[in-house]
Amino acid sequence: MSTRELATLDHPARLGGTWQGVNSSEGLTGIIDGCIAGERRCQQRVYELYYGKMMTVCLRYTKNTDQAKDILQDGFIKVFRSMEKFNRDGSFEGWIRRIMVNTAIDYFRRAKNAYLLLGEERSIEDFGDQDEEDTLVDDAEDELLDLRPADVINAMQKLTPAYRTVFNLYVFEEMTHKEISEMLGINIGTSKSNFAKAKHNLKKLLKKEHKLP
């Protein structure tokens, strides 16, 4: 599916909650098979089912809605082109989510090059292991739960791409610093440093905007 073809899919907000052109009894397996066969109605249903959740994922990795829409569009193109590779024993939503996350990371890699991973215009270096974020992380998610998702996303969009990326992978994707370091091609100390700084900056933003303790 090309960018032009994806743009012709109806936006979920305009559909009034109906599944156009798809029998409501049709299972996910049939929809996946239809997408592999290039059936537009099945592609439309996948788009409807996962647009909202995946848009939220993309918003967390970007600084504004326009960037999120670009990544979402690229991500869905990859989803439809790679449908045959989906392991049907796993979660379809989780598979799509991983594609969106990887698309977001690739987007900023192309835009910011290596220093994306630091948020600073200098080469990657080993910060060494830091213990401080291990004591900070316990309350991170509790603080976020007290706010509306839109408020948290708005604050996250003000972080640098480097800090946003590591924070998202650690908190929302529940990856370890070792897994993050392997995914981004950095060392564990760099991942820990980015997370600690992201959490510190996010807390400052949330305290200022929502008068948190």
Image: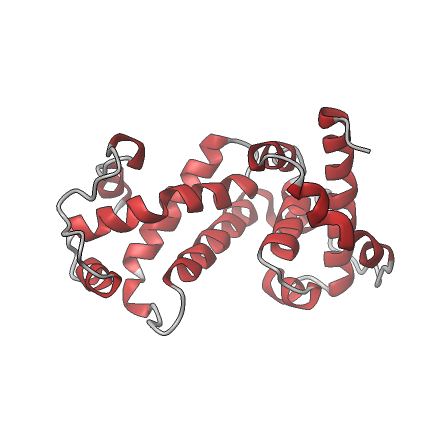
- Which residue is found at the position 58% from the left and 57% from the top? 173
For residue 97, above or below residue 119: below
Residue 68 location in percent, x, y?
47, 38
Residue 51 location in percent, x, y?
36, 43
Whether residue 1 appears in this view of the structure is: no
Q: Is residue 69 left or right of residue 80?
A: right
Q: Is residue 72 left or right of residue 29?
A: right
- Camera-side residue: 1 or 51? 51
Which of the 4 image quadrants contains residue 170? bottom right
How many tags in the picture?
0
Residue 48 location in percent, x, y?
29, 44
Whether residue 150 appears in this view of the structure is: yes
Which of the 4 image quadrants contains residue 28? bottom left
Q: In the picture, which quadrant includes the C terminus?
A: top right
For residue 153, above or below residue 208: below
Residue 199 location in percent, x, y?
75, 45
- Camera-side residue: 144 or 175? 144
For residue 85, above or below residue 119: below
Residue furthest to the right in view is 131
Q: How is the image coloured?
A: secondary structure
- Which residue is found at the position 65% from the left and 43% from the top? 145
- Which residue is found at the position 37% from the left and 62% from the top? 92
Q: Is residue 78 left or right of residue 149?
A: left
Q: Is residue 51 left or right of residue 107?
A: left
Residue furthest to the bottom in view is 89
Which of the 4 image quadrants contains residue 143? top right
